[in-house]
């Protein structure tokens, strides 16, 4: 059984194209991530619906800039690495140069920067350790679930390496069935947030590099054979059939699978093929279709052998027709706003129900029906909330600015992040757009890389639309959208900052637009900084009046673009960024929020709100 299980786990990992970092003695900036045995992780679906033992709470930490926990003075791997969590036995003269139990603690989930002043600007390796009680169940498997570990991480349970991972914003799981024992167990996690030239993102971003275990950590228990992936969606052609698949990890051919939606009196049963996959197709006439204004979620029960999962799912279709976006066959206009995963009031990353409620409260107050979750996958609570509230979602990977597009290894990493993101969220009706990049340079290598990404995403999820936030060119008073990447996209996103990084707000009155694509457009960013409470004339930079003036002119200008189907101005709330240093104004924050990080609404909020509530920005047809 055991070898069979191991074999199957490896099989799943290959199918997933896990980012499965195998990082060894490296690499950028002399940092070293360890010997790299390369045990990959997988992504379990619906982890919030599984039996879990939370590992949130206090963890001991050791900051380890010289990676003493892995290597000796000649850079050889040491046996007594910190992952052993060794303590010198009383009475014996053993040399142990660390002690987790006597080291300080921080909370998980949470980055280290905001919890300890001495770690505020720390970027590098740091070890986490905690003990936990567990009761292994016969015939079951145990998984260490990590909501997010920024950026590279290695997971150990009771001194054994469970897996390693690269990518700071996607969730992942490592199997620890063979490592856990009844009673007290010890988890050690190594997280290194050193920025890397060949990372995703790369060295430079306009957001804070919050390091550590920034989202929930838990142990998940599953049956030996279990539903590890599924896709259930309404067919685009008739909107009267639910189709897709259920994959059962470890199942042999002929394993029975069922899907039921009791409220709609729908039931499907089938069997798995030799790969553990059962194709699903069930007539589903008369469903109440999910949409903003009707966020209808059905209880869906999936069963396979001893495993059973209950999800809450909406059913809808999304497609394009010429320059239109059709939701459930009808043209829609997306009144949106960009959001970073910056926690309101307290800073750090969004990772609680309260954070999510605050952000979506503001989104609803704005009159928006759409959010762009920039610039990386957010905590899954965001998509769950969007599903419940009827808010459409643009989801993105941190393929941001000048990545190493010519490097095949970087492409593989991007595939890993895309597949992890899609696998986690393909059950959410709110997610309609997968964004593959933001503001990338228009080079041949970039276009090849991202065209491959678009094809890859279409292959993984043909039911949704692919987009990217493109840069715009200018010639005199004309703005031109003709980035060659547009050919590979379903919906063209574009960012422009007229009135802030170029020209004046009034220049927009003279700006015309030339668009090379007969596709729907979303202006994925525009805006300008304002310090909440700073008032002055509408031509005084940094004042609320200046920002409001930009919004007024943007709204008028954008309404002259006939194919504009959506808007996500930059940004809902101010967010921490090390490239924003102006004392007294920015103080380490990008101030383009419509709301400050302390919840103060700026004048521009009201202007956008008025446009959205009166249906005065963009047109559905
Ligand atoms: C952009 C980026 C975004 C920045 C923003 C700004 O174009 O996509 O990440 O934060 O501009 O404020 O400059």
Image (cartoon, grey):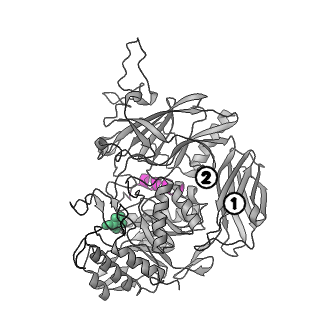
Q: Position of residue 493 (x, y in %)?
A: 43, 73
- Principal SS element in the magenta part? helix
Q: Is residue 96 above or below residue 355?
A: above
**In what element is the residue under mark 1?**
strand
Q: Looking at the rendered structure, which numbered label has been put on residue 46?
A: 2
The answer to whether residue 3 is magenta is no
Pair 1/2: label in front? 1
The residue singled out by tag 1 in the image is 299
415 vs 231, left or right, is left
Residue closer to the observer: 45 or 218: 218
**Ligand 1 is located in which of the four quadrants?**
bottom left
Q: Is residue 264 above or below residue 610?
A: above
Give the residues drawn in magenta, as a range. Answer: 406-419
Dot 2: within a 10 Å radius of its alpha carbon, few (fewer than 14), some, or many (20 or more) residues? some
Seen at 47% across and 34% down, the residue is 130
Q: Looking at the rendered structure, which numbered label has been put on residue 464?
A: none
**In what element is the residue under mark 2?**
loop
Q: Is residue 165 above or below residue 536?
A: above
Q: Position of residue 420 (x, y in %)?
A: 53, 54
Q: CA distance from mark 1 to mark 2?
A: 13 Å
């Amino acid at each position: 059984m055991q070898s069979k299980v191991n074999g199957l786990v490896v099989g799943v990992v290959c199918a997933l194209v896990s980012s499965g970092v195998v990082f060894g003695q490296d690499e950028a900036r002399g940092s070293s991530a360890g010997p790299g045995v390369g045990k990959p992780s997988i992504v379990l679906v619906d982890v919030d619906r599984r039996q879990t033992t939370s590992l949130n709470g206090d963890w001991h930490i050791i900051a380890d800039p010289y990676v003493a926990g892995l290597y000796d003075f000649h850079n050889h791997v040491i046996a007594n690495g910190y992952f052993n969590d060794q303590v010198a036995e009383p009475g014996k003269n053993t040399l142990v140069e660390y002690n987790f139990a006597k080291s300080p603690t921080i909370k998980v989930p949470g980055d280290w920067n905001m919890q300890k002043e001495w770690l505020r600007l720390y970027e590098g390796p740091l070890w986490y350790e905690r003990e936990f009680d567990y009761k292994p169940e016969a015939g079951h498997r145990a998984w260490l679930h990590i909501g997010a570990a920024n950026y590279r991480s290695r997971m150990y349970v009771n001194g054994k390496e469970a897996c390693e991972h690269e990518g700071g914003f996607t969730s992942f799981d490592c199997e620890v069935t063979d490592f856990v024992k009844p009673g007290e167990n010890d988890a050690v996690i190594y997280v290194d947030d050193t920025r890397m030239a060949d990372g995703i993102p790369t060295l430079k971003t306009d957001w804070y590099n919050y390091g550590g275990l920034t989202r929930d950590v838990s142990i998940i228990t599953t049956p030996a054979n279990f539903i590890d992936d599924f896709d259930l969606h309404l067919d685009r052609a008739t909107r009267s059939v639910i189709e897709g698949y259920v994959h059962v990890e470890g199942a042999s051919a002929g394993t029975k699978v069922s899907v039921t939606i009791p409220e709609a009196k729908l039931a499907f049963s089938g069997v798995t093929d030799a790969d553990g996959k059962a194709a699903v197709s069930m007539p589903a006439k008369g469903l109440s279709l999910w949409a903003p204004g009707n966020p209808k979620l059905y209880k869906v029960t999936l069963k396979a052998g001893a495993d059973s999962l209950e999800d809450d799912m909406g059913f809808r279709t999304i497609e394009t027709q010429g320059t239109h976006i059709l939701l459930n066959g009808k043209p829609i206009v997306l009144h949106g706003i960009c959001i970073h995963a910056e926690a309101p009031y307290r800073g750090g990353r969004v990772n609680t129900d309260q954070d999510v409620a605050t952000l979506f409260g503001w989104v609803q107050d704005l009159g928006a029906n759409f959010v762009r979750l920039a610039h990386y996958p957010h905590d899954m609570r965001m998509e769950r909330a969007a599903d419940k509230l009827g808010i459409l979602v643009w989801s993105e990977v941190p393929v941001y600015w000048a990545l190493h597009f010519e490097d095949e290894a970087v492409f593989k990493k991007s595939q890993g992040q895309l597949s992890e993101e899609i696998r986690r969220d393909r059950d959410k009706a709110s997610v309609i757009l997968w964004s593959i990049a933001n503001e990338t340079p228009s080079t041949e290598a970039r276009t090849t890389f991202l065209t491959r990404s678009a094809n890859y995403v279409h292959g993984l999820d043909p039911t949704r639309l692919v987009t990217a936030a493109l840069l715009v060119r200018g010639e005199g008073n004309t703005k031109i959208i003709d980035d060659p990447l547009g050919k590979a996209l379903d919906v063209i996103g574009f960012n422009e900052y007229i009135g802030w990084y170029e020209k004046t707000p009034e220049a927009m009155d003279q700006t015309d637009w030339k668009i090379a694509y007969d596709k729907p457009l979303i202006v994925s960013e525009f805006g300008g900084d304002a310090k909440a409470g700073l008032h002055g004339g509408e031509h005084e930079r940094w004042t609320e009046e200046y920002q409001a003036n930009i919004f007024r002119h943007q709204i008028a200008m954008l309404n002259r673009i006939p194919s504009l189907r959506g808007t996500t101005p930059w940004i809902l709330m101010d967010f921490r960024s090390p490239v924003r240093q102006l004392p007294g104004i920015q103080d380490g924050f990008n101030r383009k929020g419509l709301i400050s990080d302390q919840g103060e609404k700026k004048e521009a909020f009201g202007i956008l709100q008025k446009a959205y509530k009166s249906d005065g920005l963009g047109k559905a047809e």
